[in-house]
């Protein structure tokens, strides 16, 4: 016995799984690129940080500065990503309602948004200090 949702998407299931895997890979590559950019930016700021130490900034102050900047960048990136995702979902739903079954039911899930936000907020401390 096959459920109705399985019957509706049976013909495009392989394409959807491939799209899901490709999206995950692109997100993983993008995340690695952002982390690399944060590390490179921190390395380039070595002279600025040295100047701050010379003028009396403590190590704790420098760590707080770098963590704050990384957290702000991650938060803004997370919000921007959610806005882009919602916009793209609306765009896709407007263009192809007849081509993909159950296209109107696609929504951003709370679980997906939470895991994305948690990832964006938890990894910058490892890349900024």
Image: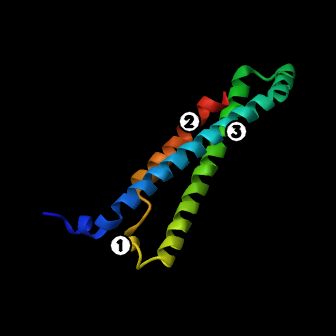
**Where is mark 3, residue-wise?**
37
Query: Is 12 above or below relative to 32?
Result: below
**Which-is-in-front pick, marks 3 and 1?**
1
Quarter of the picture containing the C terminus is top right
Q: CA distance from mark 1 to mark 2?
A: 36 Å
In the image, taking residue 75 as reference, residue 47 lies left or right, namely: right
Name the residue rendered at 83%, 22% in the picture.
50
**Where is mark 2, residue-wise?**
123
Name the residue rendered at 60%, 47% in the picture.
75
Q: Mark 2 or mark 3: name the one nearer the start of the chain.
A: 3
Q: Residues within 10 Å of mark 2 (few under 14, many from 20)?
A: some
SS of the residue at dot 2?
Answer: loop
In the image, taking residue 122 as reference, residue 76 lies left or right, namely: right
Q: Position of residue 19 (x, y in %)?
A: 45, 57
Q: CA distance from mark 3 to mark 1?
A: 39 Å
Q: Mark 3 or mark 1: name the one nearer the start of the chain.
A: 3
Q: Mark 1 or mark 2: name the one nearer the start of the chain.
A: 1
Q: Residues within 10 Å of mark 3 (few under 14, many from 20)?
A: few
Query: Is 73 above or below relative to 56?
Result: below
């Amino acid at each position: 016995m096959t459920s109705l949702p399985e019957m509706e998407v049976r013909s495009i299931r392989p394409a959807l799984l491939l799209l899901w895997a490709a999206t995950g890979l692109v997100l993983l590559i993008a995340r690695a690129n952002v982390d690399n950019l944060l590390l490179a930016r921190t390395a380039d700021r070595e002279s600025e940080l040295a100047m701050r130490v010379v003028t009396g900034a403590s190590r704790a102050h420098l760590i707080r500065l770098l963590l704050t900047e990384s957290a702000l960048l991650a938060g803004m990136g997370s919000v921007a990503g959610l806005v882009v995702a919602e916009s793209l979902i609306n765009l896709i739903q407007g263009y192809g309602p007849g081509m993909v079954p159950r296209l109107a039911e696609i929504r951003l899930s709370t679980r997906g948004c939470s895991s994305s936000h948690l990832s964006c907020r938890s990894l910058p401390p490892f890349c900024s200090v």
